[in-house]
Image (spheres, rainbow, N blue to C red):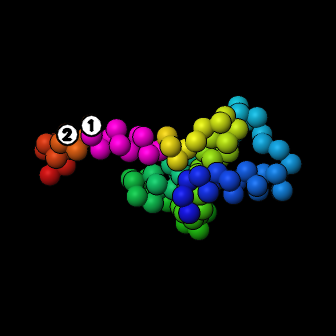
Amino acid sequence: MNIQNAQKIVDQWIKTHGVRYFNELTNMAQLTEEVGEVARIIARRYGEQSEKESDKSKDLGEELADVLFVVLCLANQTGVDLQAAFDAKLELKTKRDHDRHHANNKLK
């Protein structure tokens, strides 16, 4: 599935199950909350914080999917073609960062 299809699927889901999109500020707050849940898992599972027993059953993939869902909602409701934006960003990063990262001694 490409990003355009994902945006269409989310839009259809909202229209079928969600009544309407939350407003942009509510979705931004929701996105922040979901990113916080991802950060908690990463910090405890892969970082130096100890993982609480209640966190061990948390699914990182599920939390990342929550982030993606809200990002797709925000793109839909603000008229952003996320596929075009992503493609343009990847092209920019490829041109700008290829030599930069190869020359970075910290990455060797």
- Please state the horizontal and vertical placement of residue 66, each as a whole percent of the image: 63, 54
27 to 57, vertically: above or below: above
Q: Residues within 10 Å of mark 1 (few under 14, many from 20)?
A: few
- Please state the horizontal and vertical placement of residue 73, each as a whole percent of the image: 68, 45
Give the mark toward the camera: 2 or 1: 1
Label 1 SS: helix
Report the span colored magenta.
86-95
Quadrant of residue 64 within the rendered picture? bottom right
Label at residue 96: 1
Q: Is residue 74 visible?
A: no
Q: Is mark 2 in CB contact (under 8 Å) with mark 1?
A: yes
Q: Is residue 90 magenta?
A: yes
- Decide which of 18, 32 is in the foreground and name it: 18
Q: Residue at x 29, y 44 (%)?
A: 94
**Amino acid type, residue under disc 1 in the picture:** Arg
Q: Looking at the magenta stretch, what is its main secondary structure?
A: helix
- Decide which of 57, 7 is in the foreground and name it: 7
Q: Which residue is mark 2?
A: 100
Q: State left or right for residue 24 relative to residue 105.
A: right
Label 2 SS: helix
10 to 32, vertically: above or below: below
